[in-house]
Every structure is written in structure tokens, then in C-alpha cells.
Image (cartoon, coloured by chain):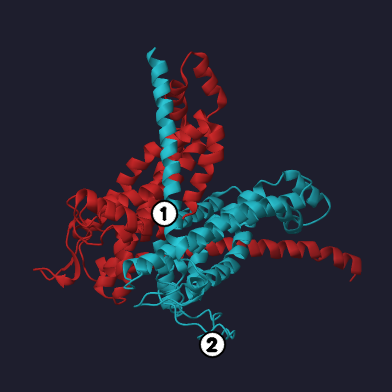
Chain colours: A cyan, B red
């Protein structure tokens, strides 16, 4: 019978397609890890990069990535929480809400290079922050905000309405209900979303090239005065991140060991992003278990 | 005045907290909207300067093929023809979408219709991991694996639209797949049961009922993937060759809007024509992303009515 044969054939083809995708991922990860992991050493992770000779590390870039991530999250998380609360709890169904939602949708679909260019124009040139961690963190905030906001809103909406009624019936105001009842309940979802967002931010480069800059001046890790230019904490120093570093050495680099350095840096980047993903799952489950009877 | 009356008339502590909280959340949301408005305003004001201040003709900007803003042509007008970049951007976008669609739809059908068990255990994590890999890593792999591979196979430098297509194909695959999975899962179970009860095979049911019912969702996924491909900058910039020439085949060095922007904006002086022309490209990118957004809304509306 023909239709049965076609059915078998189609099933076979679908198995092949699924297999090909798995093979693509396996070879991607395998390539990066096999090329990169042998290059990772304590020296590689801690020493500064070199521009013209072999043997450079990624120490400063790695620190910059984490510092920038921290600053970006510190700025974007409260904003996303506020915006998410507004959309989930206060927004009425009218044209204004539609406009707000459209704006968030547009912001989330903007190419990150456009966000980076806007940051360059406004923070670097207009506000005169220069190529700095602060400009980079603000650009990353814009890149991160729409997704975080949507995540907060979805997590809040997933909380049953009876919880709100219970809070209101106890005489709490709406805001107090949200802060003391709804947010704790929605916390696992919110935190999972934040960690996933952190993974995205950690690997982002296009928004940073013209905001945080492409150079990593030497840092003095003994100097923790945030106003000193050599201090790692100074938010006004240019800071090349790990992802930008990979791009930079591959497109303009002249180090003799550029391939090895970028393989090692890519492996570190991927391991970090994987760690973020695993952490998101683990923490989400853990908090959920801790806060509910499940 | 009567202290009780006074206390009743003043807003309570709760009411004050409520008002303050509401204001805080309103402030956050207004900030996001303001950022979107500011992005459009700033990019547009820079991007339109090419046409208003430097008097470049809009049509020649979109249709001419020579991109050398520093040089003036015989009539004294600067040579800013963005067609090579436009062709490059649309080329990699459409080609990667064409290649990715069968894979994505196939994988999604596998995950929802053929083997939900294997799909959930293996394919789902694979897709999630693919989403998580940063774009520079894709670019690096493209540069160190795909480009030499094409060079050995077809000759030339290996840089070009074909290499860009390969990299983007892997990058948009997870986006399209996961949205297609959502669309297929949303098809009610009784559609499948009705079709199977009529004696249709699983493939007949899938291809003629389920996929058709999920079509708007699948198309949305594909457009999302295309929007991502169109706006992707670094991964493409690393493998496309960055020559602002009209590509005459798939393996000749080309450029996209994003690749010219990333490599050019740092090397030009703010306010000069070279710089303004780049901002016009950014504006074009912004408008295209808006167009993709509208297209997705339109598909959603069309799908709803059925």
C-alpha cells in the first residue's frame, strides 16, 4: 500500500533530520571543547592578553565579563521587576497598554548591533561616559530589559488569582500583596529567567564593541579604589569582555597563537554559558522545593 | 478638628504605600518605552542626515552599487550605494531561512508527533543548548571550520554568502524549531484523532492536518528566525569577507548591513558623510526589524480569523 510506504519513508526522514541536528550540536561542542580545553590553564585564565606575541591569557577579559554582567544585572533587574509588576498587576486593557507591549516587543526584536550603536551615540558620546563599563552595562540593560520584563510578567501571571484575593481580603494593599505574596510565589520562575538572561548577556558582544570598548588596559588587582583608573572596580575604564575579545582576535588580531587563544576563550565562554543554564534549572527547582510543599 | 475624623480623611499608610508602589512600577515601564522612542529618534536623526544634510538621493542610495563614501563621482555626489549590503543581508537571510525551515519543521514534527519521549529527552536539551551558544562562538567556528571547508571544496577564499548562510542556518535553527514545536503542540488533539479515525496514516495526518492547522505559528517562527538572521552582526561579519561589492556568486566576498556597521563605525569621524551613511544603514536595519515585527503581527491576525 502506497500511503503506508510513504508514512514509513517520512518517519525515516524525520529520524534522519533529528539525528542531523543532534550531530551538529555534538560536533560544535566537541570541536570547541577538544580545541579549547587543552589550552585552558590557570595561567591562561589569569594572565593578561598580549597583542603581538604568543602566550597571552584572558584574565582581564574574564574579570570584565563578570563585572559587566554584575553591573548590568544590578541595573536591569529592579527595572524589569517594576515593569513586570506594572504589566501583570496594574495595566488595564486599553490602547496605552497595547502601545507599551508593542514597544517592549520592538525592543526585544531589535538587532543587538543597533542597541550597541544607540549606546555609543547616547552614553559614549552624548553623556561623555566614553568607552566604559558603565556605557556597556547600560547598553546590556537595554538589550536585557524586554526579555526580563516579559519573564517577570509571565511568572507573576502564573500565580493563581486566589492568592491575590487572599492578600486583598487580609486588608493588604495591592502593592503589598504583590511584594509579600505574589513575588515570593513567582520567585523560582523569575530567578530562572534572570540566570538565563545572565547567560545571554555573558555571551553578548555586538552591543559592547562600541560601548564598553575593545581594549583592556592593565589592571592592578591590589587596588580596590573605584575611582582609580587602574582599579578593577572603576566603572569608567574601557573593558573588553571575553566575547568581544574572541571577535577582536579573529577579525583583527595579529597574535601568532590567535586560533588557540580564541579556541580556549570560546571553550571558557561556552562552559560559562552551560553553567548558567544548569544553574538556572537547579536553582529554580531548589527554590521551588524550598518554598512550596512539593 | 476631631482627631478621628482627621485620621479617616487622611490617606492610610497602606494607601500611601500603594500609591508609591504604583508610581515606581509606572516609572519602570515608562523608562522602557522612553528608551524605545529614544532609539528611534537618535538613529533616525543620524540616519536621515545623509539625505537632508549631505543631499544624497534616497533612490541612488538604495540602488547604486558602489560603496565608497569618501570618493565623489563625476557629478560631485558622494558614492554611497548600499545595494551590495542590502543584497548581502537579504541573501544570507533568505538562504539560511530556506535551509533551516525543513530541518526545523522536521525536528519539531519529530518532537511532537513521532517520538515525544526521545524529543523531550534528547532534542529539547539540544535545542536549548544551541540557543545558548554565543554568536561569536558561532563566528569563530565558521571562521575556523566552515570557511576552510568551502575554500577546499569550491576554491576562492571561502569567505562569502555561502559561509554566512551556514553559520546563520545553525543560529536560527533552534529559534524556528522551538516556535514550530509550540505551534504544533497547540493543535487540538481531536484534530489528529479525527484524521486517524478516517484511516489516514500518521504522515498523512501530520502533513495534511496538523501542519496545516499550525501554519500561522510555523510562519511566525520562520519570520522570527529571519529577523534574527537579518540582525545578526558578529558571526556574519567574521565569515562573509567584508567586501562592499555586489556578490556575483555565493562564494565571493560580500558584506551585509550589520557587517559594514560593525567594521566601519569606529573608523569614521562623527558627523562626516562616511559616518552619516553608516547611520543610514543602521536606520535601514531598524526599519527592517520593524517590518519583520509587523509581518509577524499580520500573520498572527490572519491566523486568528480562520
Relative image position of residue B169 (x, y in whole percent): 36, 47
Say what secondary structure mark 1 lies in: helix
Q: How many marks?
A: 2
Find residue B261 and report its image quarter: bottom left
Label 1 sits on residue: A31
**Above or below: residue A171 compared with residue A13:** below
Of residues B304 and B68, the one nearer the viewer is: B68
Residue found 57% across the figure and 58% down from its top: A276
Residue A120: % across, % down: 41, 72
Instruction: Write the residue at 19% across / 50% down.
Output: B249
Question: What label does residue B217 carry, if any?
Answer: none
Disc 2 versus disc 1: distance between alpha carbons?
A: 41 Å
> Closest to the observer: B172 or B270?
B172
User: Which of the labelled discs sits on residue A228, or is there none?
Assistant: 2
Q: Is residue B103 visible?
A: yes
> Crowding at label 1, few (<14), some or many (≥20) Cα neighbours within 10 Å?
some
Judged left or right of residue A68, residue B64 is left
Q: Earlier in the sequence, mark 2 or mark 1?
A: 1
Chain to which the residue tagged by mark 2 belongs: A
Work out whether residue B213 or residue A54 is closer to the camera in this orientation and state it.
A54
Q: Nearer the viewer, mark 2 or mark 1?
A: 1
Q: Provide the secondary structure element on which disc 2 rests.
A: loop
Give the vertical position of B103 relative to B3 (above or below). Answer: above
User: In which quadrant will I find the N terminus of chain A?
Assistant: top left
Q: Seen in the image, is A137 located left or right of residue A87?
A: left
| Place of residue B304 in the rendered image (x, y in percent of width and height, measured from the top left) | 48, 34
Q: Is residue A91 visible?
A: no
Q: Position of residue B184 (x, y in %)?
A: 50, 33
The residue lying at 33 percent from left, 69 percent from top is B46
Amino acid at each position: 500500500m502506497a500511503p503506508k510506504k510513504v508514512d514509513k519513508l517520512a518517519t525515516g526522514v524525520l529520524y534522519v533530520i533529528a539525528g542531523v541536528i543532534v550531530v551538529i550540536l555534538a560536533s560544535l561542542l566537541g570541536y570547541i571543547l577538544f580545541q579549547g580545553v587543552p589550552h585552558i590553564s590557570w595561567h591562561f585564565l589569569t594572565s593578561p592578553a598580549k597583542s603581538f606575541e604568543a602566550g597571552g591569557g584572558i584574565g582581564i577579559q574574564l574579570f570584565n565579563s563578570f563585572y559587566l554582567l554584575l553591573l548590568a544585572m544590578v541595573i536591569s533587574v529592579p527595572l524589569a521587576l517594576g515593569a513586570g509588576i506594572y504589566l501583570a498587576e496594574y495595566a488595564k486593557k486599553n490602547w496605552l497598554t497595547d502601545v507599551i507591549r508593542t514597544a517592549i516587543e520592538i525592543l526585544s526584536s531589535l538587532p543587538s548591533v543597533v542597541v550597541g550603536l544607540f549606546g555609543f551615540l547616547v552614553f559614549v558620546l552624548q553623556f561623555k561616559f566614553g568607552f566604559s563599563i558603565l556605557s556597556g552595562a547600560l547598553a546590556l540593560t537595554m538589550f536585557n530589559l524586554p526579555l526580563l520584563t516579559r519573564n517577570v510578567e509571565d511568572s507573576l501571571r502564573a500565580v493563581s488569582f486566589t492568592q491575590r484575593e487572599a492578600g486583598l481580603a487580609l486588608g493588604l494593599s495591592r502593592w503589598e500583596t504583590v511584594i509579600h505574596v505574589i513575588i515570593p510565589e513567582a520567585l523560582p520562575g523569575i530567578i530562572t529567567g534572570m540566570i538565563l538572561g545572565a547567560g545571554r548577556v555573558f555571551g553578548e558582544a555586538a552591543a559592547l564593541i562600541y560601548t564598553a570598548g575593545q581594549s583592556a588596559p592593565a589592571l592592578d588587582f591590589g587596588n580596590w579604589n573605584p575611582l582609580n583608573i587602574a582599579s578593577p572596580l572603576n566603572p569608567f575604564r574601557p573593558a573588553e569582555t571575553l566575547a568581544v575579545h574572541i571577535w577582536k582576535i579573529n577579525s583583527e588580531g595579529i597574535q601568532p597563537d590567535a586560533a588557540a587563544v580564541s579556541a580556549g576563550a570560546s571553550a571558557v565562554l561556552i562552559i560559562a554559558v552551560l553553567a548558567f543554564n544548569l544553574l538556572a534549572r537547579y536553582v529554580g527547582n531548589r527554590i521551588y522545593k524550598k518554598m512550596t510543599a512539593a | 478638628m476631631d482627631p478621628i475624623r482627621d485620621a479617616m480623611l487622611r490617606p492610610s499608610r497602606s494607601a500611601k504605600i500603594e500609591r508609591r508602589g504604583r508610581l515606581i512600577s509606572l516609572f519602570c515601564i515608562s523608562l522602557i518605552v522612553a528608551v524605545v522612542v529614544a532609539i528611534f529618534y537618535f538613529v533616525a536623526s543620524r540616519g536621515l542626515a545623509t539625505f537632508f544634510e549631505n543631499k544624497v538621493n534616497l533612490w541612488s542610495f538604495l540602488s547604486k552599487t558602489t560603496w565608497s563614501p569618501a570618493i565623489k563621482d563625476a557629478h560631485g555626489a558622494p558614492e554611497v550605494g548600499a545595494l551590495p549590503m542590502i543584497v548581502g543581508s537579504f541573501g544570507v537571510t533568505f538562504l539560511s531561512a530556506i535551509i533551516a525551515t525543513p530541518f526545523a519543521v522536521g525536528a519539531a514534527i519529530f518532537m511532537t508527533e513521532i517520538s515525544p519521549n526521545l524529543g523531550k529527552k534528547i532534542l529539547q536539551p539540544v535545542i536549548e543548548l544551541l540557543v545558548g551558544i554565543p554568536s561569536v562562538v558561532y563566528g569563530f567556528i565558521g571562521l575556523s571550520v566552515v570557511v576552510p571547508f568551502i575554500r577546499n571544496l569550491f576554491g576562492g577564499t571561502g569567505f562569502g554568502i555561502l559561509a554566512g548562510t551556514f553559520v546563520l542556518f545553525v543560529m536560527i535553527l533552534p529559534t524556528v524549531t522551538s516556535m514550530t514545536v509550540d505551534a504544533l503542540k497547540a493543535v487540538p488533539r481531536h484534530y489528529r484523532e479525527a484524521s486517524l479515525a478516517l484511516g489516514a496514516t500518521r504522515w498523512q495526518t501530520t502533513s495534511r492536518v496538523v501542519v496545516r492547522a499550525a501554519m500561522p505559528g510555523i510562519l511566525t517562527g520562520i519570520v522570527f528566525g529571519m529577523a534574527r538572521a537579518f540582525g545578526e552582526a558578529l558571526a556574519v561579519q567574521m565569515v562573509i569577507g567584508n567586501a562592499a561589492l555586489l556578490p556575483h556568486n555565493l562564494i565571493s566576498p560580500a558584506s551585509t548591513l550589520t557587517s559594514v556597521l560593525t567594521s566601519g563605525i569606529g573608523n569614521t569621524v562623527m558627523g562626516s558623510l562616511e559616518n552619516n551613511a553608516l547611520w543610514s544603514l543602521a536606520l535601514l536595519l531598524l526599519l527592517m526589524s520593524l517590518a519583520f515585527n509587523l509581518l509577524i503581527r499580520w500573520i498572527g491576525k490572519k491566523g486568528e480569523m480562520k
